[in-house]
């Protein structure tokens, strides 16, 4: 007799692995913004469109009959364009699509899920840094794997790798995969070459597969050189690099992503992926292939996007600091983190729930990204991938709220 038949579990109850899977924090915060009319600096999506040529190419592809399934591995022209683009931009080793080293996925999200399902089974350990993007813990659970969060400790105005803690976590024979993310969401950290070298040492020593989520690879600021762990000695053969058109071309709703790596890693990933979606977005894949292949348009767009995001980061950072919210260094990506304690808050969820009422702005509680027990609850994440006028209005509102707090709340430093 099954558990459902015996009455221990009701048939319509979700499977135990689903426990705790509510609506994501991003959906919750976007809904809060929509319900209150507050400015949404929570969920990370741009409020302007991607390059014109890309949008027109997608419309043309829809109008010219590219509307049936793509191959499971993705359109060959997109796989080729991804490989060429990586080489042109010096994004690590060369990948050969003709040898099965590139697969197109439904966003980076599917690539991450397929990689975890492919390499982690029941009880295997999936190491990652804490905090981490919210899908990591969820897919580990779906795979039956144990997520081992290695803390990125607050270090001045940034977040630092603790290589000894990583080494200690990797010692277990059950450790199979390290899931790395750089530039990092939510901290804005870009792992330094020295940190990547330390991580690579640990992975080689303990024979780990590395899955590196690099969706913000082009969004790196202040002239920082970007490096991928896949390019370090001995790492190409054990690394899957994941990225996506969503961030690079400001089309987060398109969900065109990819995974590159040696065929021995990409084949199992593709086997898992074909039973998740098989394939998706043929006309969008066609359009992304065209823009990636037109090197001049593509490179001009990328340069101008990263310059403009750096400006917008500075605008938001200055505004948050003026409002008395200390910020952390955002070296790449879409987000800035702040210390909310100067506003009298110790609980980031309460801060974020009250912020629309107090300031007409929505942020995301950083605790949503933490897996460890003793993680900080005094960090909130703000997105700066919004138009300058929107950010200006947001910082004006935050300044107003800080003034009101300063008057009404003794102990809060007026700004
Ligand atoms: N990884 C990170 C670190 C992200 O921030 C995001 C989304 N913002 C994703 C993966 C998901 O990418 P996609 O939308 O291409 O699935
Ligand atoms: N990656 C986006 C963020 O961090 C959200 C993506 C999503 O809503 N799943 O805000």
Image (spheres, rainbow, N blue to C red):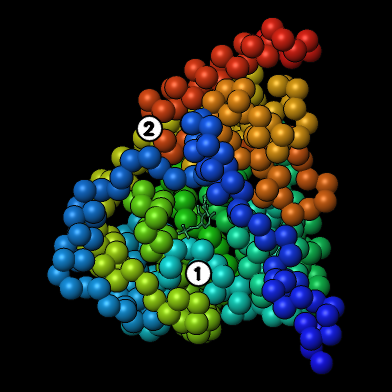
Q: Earlier in the sequence, mark 2 or mark 1?
A: 1
Residue for badge 2: 387
Does 310 appear above or below 266? above
* Residue at the image point whose x is 67% and y is 61% from the top: 21
> Total number of numbered labels?
2
Relative image position of residue 241 (x, y in whole percent): 49, 66
Q: Determine the image quadrant of residue 4.
A: bottom right
* Residue at the image point whose x is 66% and y is 72% from the top: 142
- Viewer can see residue 315: no
As helix, strand or loop, the secondary structure at mark 1 comes to helix
Name the foreground residue: 65 vs 381: 65
Does 59 appear above or below 75? above
Residue for badge 1: 111
Q: Quadrant of the C terminus?
A: top right
Looking at the image, is mark 2 or mark 1 nearer the viewer? 2
Does 88 appear above or below 38? below
Q: Determine the image quadrant of residue 347.
A: top right
Distance from Cα at disc 2 to Cα at disc 1 = 29 Å
Residue 331 shown left or right of residue 65 in the figure: right
Relative image position of residue 261 (x, y in whole percent): 48, 74
* Residue at the image point whose x is 23% and y is 60% from the top: 58
Crowding at dot 1, Cα within 10 Å, few <14 / some 14-19 / many 20+, comes out as many
Within 8 Å of ligand 1, the CB of disc 1? yes
Looking at this view, name the residue that lies furthest to the top: 407
Relative image position of residue 144 (x, y in whole percent): 72, 75
* Residue at the image point whose x is 72% and y is 21% from the top: 342
Question: Do the residues under discs 2 and 1 have CB atoms within 8 angstroms?
Answer: no
Name the foreground residue: 52 vs 276: 276
Name the foreground residue: 322 vs 263: 322
Relative image position of residue 106 (x, y in whole percent): 43, 68
């Amino acid at each position: 007799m099954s558990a459902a038949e015996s009455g221990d579990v009701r048939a319509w109850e979700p499977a135990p692995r689903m426990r705790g899977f509510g609506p994501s924090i991003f959906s919750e915060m976007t809904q809060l913004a929509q319900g209150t009319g507050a400015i949404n600096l929570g969920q990370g999506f741009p409020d302007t469109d991607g390059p014109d040529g890309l949008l027109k190419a997608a419309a043309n592809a829809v109008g010219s009959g590219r509307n049936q399934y793509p191959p499971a591995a993705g359109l060959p022209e997109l796989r080729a364009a991804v490989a060429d683009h990586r080489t042109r931009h010096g994004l690590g080793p060369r990948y050969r699509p003709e040898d099965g080293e590139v697969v197109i996925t439904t966003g980076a999200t599917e690539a991450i899920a397929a990689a975890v399902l492919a390499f982690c089974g029941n009880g295997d350990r999936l190491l990652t840094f804490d905090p981490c993007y919210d899908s990591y813990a969820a897919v580990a659970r779906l795979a039956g794997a144990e997520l081992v969060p290695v803390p990125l400790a607050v270090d001045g105005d940034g977040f630092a790798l603790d290589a000894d803690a990583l080494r200690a976590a990797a010692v277990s024979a059950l450790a199979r995969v390290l899931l790395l993310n750089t530039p990092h969401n939510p901290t804005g950290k870009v792992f330094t070459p020295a940190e990547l070298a330390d991580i690579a040492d640990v992975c080689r020593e303990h024979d780990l597969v590395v899955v590196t989520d690099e969706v913000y690879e082009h969004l790196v600021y202040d002239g920082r050189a970007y490096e991928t762990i896949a390019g370090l000695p001995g790492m190409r053969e054990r690394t899957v690099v994941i990225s996506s058109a969503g961030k690079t071309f400001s089309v987060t709703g398109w969900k065109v992503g990819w995974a590159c790596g040696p065929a021995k890693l990409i084949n199992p990933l593709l086997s898992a992926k074909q039973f998740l979606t098989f394939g998706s977005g043929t006309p969008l894949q066609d359009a992304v292939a065209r823009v990636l292949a037109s090197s001049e348009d593509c490179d001009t767009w990328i340069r101008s996007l990263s310059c403009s995001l750096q400006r917008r980061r500075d605008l938001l950072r200055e505004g948050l600091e003026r409002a008395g919210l200390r910020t952390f260094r955002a070296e790449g990506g879409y987000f800035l983190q702040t210390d909310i304690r100067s506003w009298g808050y110790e609980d980031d969820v309460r801060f974020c729930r009250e912020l629309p009422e107090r300031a007409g702005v929505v942020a995301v509680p950083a605790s949503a990204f933490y897996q460890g027990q003793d993680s900080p609850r005094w960090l909130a994440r703000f997105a700066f991938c919004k138009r300058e006028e929107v950010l200006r209005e947001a910082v004006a509102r935050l300044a107003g709220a800080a003034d009101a707090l300063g008057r009404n709340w003794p102990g809060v430093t007026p700004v």
